[in-house]
Amino acid sequence: MQDSIQREITIKAPKERVYEAITDPAQIITWFPDSIDGGLSKGDKPFLHFGEHDKTQIYVVAAQPHDYFSYRWVPGGNTFDGDIASVPTTLVEFRITETDGGSVVTLTESGFASLPADIIEASFKQNSGGWDFMMERLEKKFAEA
Amino acid sequence: MLVADTFKALGDPVRLQMIQRLSQSTQYTVGSLSAGLGLTRQGARKHLQLLADAELVSLQPRGRQTKVTLDATTLAHAKRFITELELQWDQRLLALKDFVENDVPTKQTNT
């Protein structure tokens, strides 16, 4: 069983532009959380907001323009409100490399096997719920079109 | 069986190695499965009992030996957890791509 997830996507833009979209608080909210309290520099612990009620704190581990960005995430913690250093987390990493005509973003989330049982269970529920929600929105979008 | 128990049982290098071996052959016994893993017979039993309790493997006595086989259903549940996380990241990365390439927010807001 794998301890990590890895995904890759090619984006037709220079890596500086991609790095900015991931690490600029004003830009990250266009594709990830709905809003953010705090910065995205190394050592920052901003709160990410999802919808009106859910928020979670992340911890920025590294921010190296324009190649690498990583943070600690509390799985099952869309509503996590506490000191992130005190709880088990997964590590989320973005690696950006330049390729012909664009950039390749490699996303890695690791650390599942060493999480305590109750956290995984919460994460499982959160993520499957999250996916159902996304599917619903997607279907709605197509129904409207 | 909770998916959490599955991950807990899998969160050990020796047991992961055992699962990998079992996914390649259905002919393992306790002895052949633990060969080369640096385990005592008692140690191997302990790990296998834990995997059996998590319903990841079945132990079937065959005379003086015990046959070990993989329970694919439980592994499939754990796999589903990972698959859902992967789908969620696919979704997010596509939203990132749309934003960067078109310079317009494509994510629907939640409010």
Image (spheres, rainbow, N blue to C red):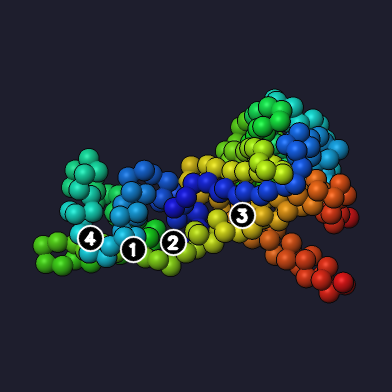
Taking the spot 65% from the left edge, 28% from the top edge, the residue there is A62
Residue in front for this viewpoint, A21 or B13: A21
Residue A130 rendering spot, x and y as whole percentages: 70, 58
Residue holding disc 1: B70
Left-right relation of A90 to B111 = left
Going from N to C along the chain, the mark reached first, 2 or 3, is 2
Q: Quadrant of residue B86?
A: bottom right
Residue holding disc 2: B75
CA–CA distance between discs 2 and 3? 16 Å
Are there few (<14), some (14-19), or many (20+) residues within 10 Å of tag 2?
A: some
Which label sits on residue B85? 3
Q: Are marks 1 and 3 in contact (CB under 8 Å)?
A: no
Q: Are marks 4 and 1 in contact (CB under 8 Å)?
A: no
Q: Chain of mark 1?
A: B
Q: Type of residue at label 1?
A: Leu
Residue B105 rendering spot, x and y as whole percentages: 86, 50
Which label sits on residue B28? 4
CA–CA distance between discs 3 and 4? 33 Å
Going from N to C along the chain, the mark reached first, 4 or 1, is 4
* Residue closest to the far bottom: A143
Whether residue A98 is visible to the viewer of this picture, yes or no, is yes
Going from N to C along the chain, the mark reached first, 2 or 4, is 4
Image mark count: 4
Q: Quadrant of residue A39?
A: top right
CA–CA distance between discs 1 and 3? 24 Å
Q: Type of residue at label 4?
A: Tyr
